[in-house]
Structure formats: C-alpha cells, structure tokens
Image (cartoon, rainbow, N blue to C red):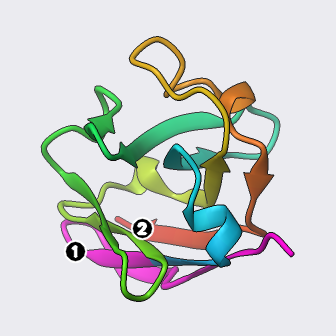
Amino acid sequence: QVQLVESGGGLVQAGGSLRLSCAASARAFGSSGMGWFRQAPGKEREFVAAISLTGSYYSSTTQGRFTVSSDNTKNTVYLQMNSLKPEDTTVYYCAAAPGAFTNENYCSAGTYVYWGQGTQVTVSS
C-alpha cells in the first residue's frame, strides 16, 4: 500500500518557522523523487521543493527560506520553512514520483503519482 502522511502544519506568526514531515510507506519512499507542493483555494497546485538522489530543488519563491531533506531510516521527508510570510498560508502536500524524475519535470505536479492528504499552514501578519 502506498501512503503519504503529512504533519507539522499549524499557525505561526510572520517571520516564524515550521517543519513539515511526510511519513511515507516503503514503496512511496522508494520513488525517484519526493516533492512538496501547495495549493490555495481556486488556484493551481504550486511547486515548493523536491528531493532526489541527485539533489534538492526549490521554487524561486521558497529558495533560501525553505529546506527539503529526508531521513532514510524513517522513510520521512521534511520541509523546514523559515522566514514565513502571510502569503505562504495554504495547504501543503507531499508527493512521490515513482517514474522518471528529471531537471525538466521535477516541478510539474503531473510528475508525481502519489499524494498525501495535505496539512494546513497559516502565517499571521
């Protein structure tokens, strides 16, 4: 069974930090790449960060503030979010890409097959 479970969301003041966790089943964690996306109501799913054996990747809006990492002993991927802004407020999703994961497709939601249920992050001003 493929399962991704996010946790760590919550309410934080602007400038604060949160760490999201994504606990993955073994099958999901063995994917080519693991990613974080976020989606506000009425908007498309937005790429946040991703990690694979070849490196980590970030969007222009999160580069320098967010850090993606993984713990292979726990089958868990993390998203450390620092210097949070009110515009970071939304639901964050963890995703796994079992197929091809390249420099051209890592930021596309269509690359990812398995998705978690999401965790809400709210940043107050």
Q: Is residue 115 above or below residue 71?
A: above
Farthest residue toward the top? 104
User: Circle 1 is placed at which residue position?
Assistant: 16
Secondary-structure class at tag 2: strand
Q: Is residue 44 above or below residue 51?
A: above
Q: Position of residue 32 (x, y in %)?
A: 52, 43
Please report the residue visible at 80 percent of the width from the left and 69 percent of the height from the top. 2
Q: Which residues are magenta?
A: 1-20
**Which label was assigned to residue 73?**
none
User: Circle 2 is placed at which residue position?
Assistant: 123
Q: Does residue 77 appear left or right of residue 95 in this picture? A: left
How busy is the neighbourhood of tag 2: few (under 14 within 10 Å), some, or many (20 plus)?
Answer: many
Q: Quadrant of the C terminus?
A: bottom left
In the rendered structure, are the residues bearing label 2 and label 1 in contact, judged by CB atoms less than 8 Å apart? Answer: yes
Please report the residue visible at 48 percent of the width from the left and 85 percent of the height from the top. 8
Q: Does residue 111 appear left or right of residue 38 in this picture? A: right
Front-lying residue, 90 or 56: 56
Q: Quadrant of the N terminus?
A: bottom right
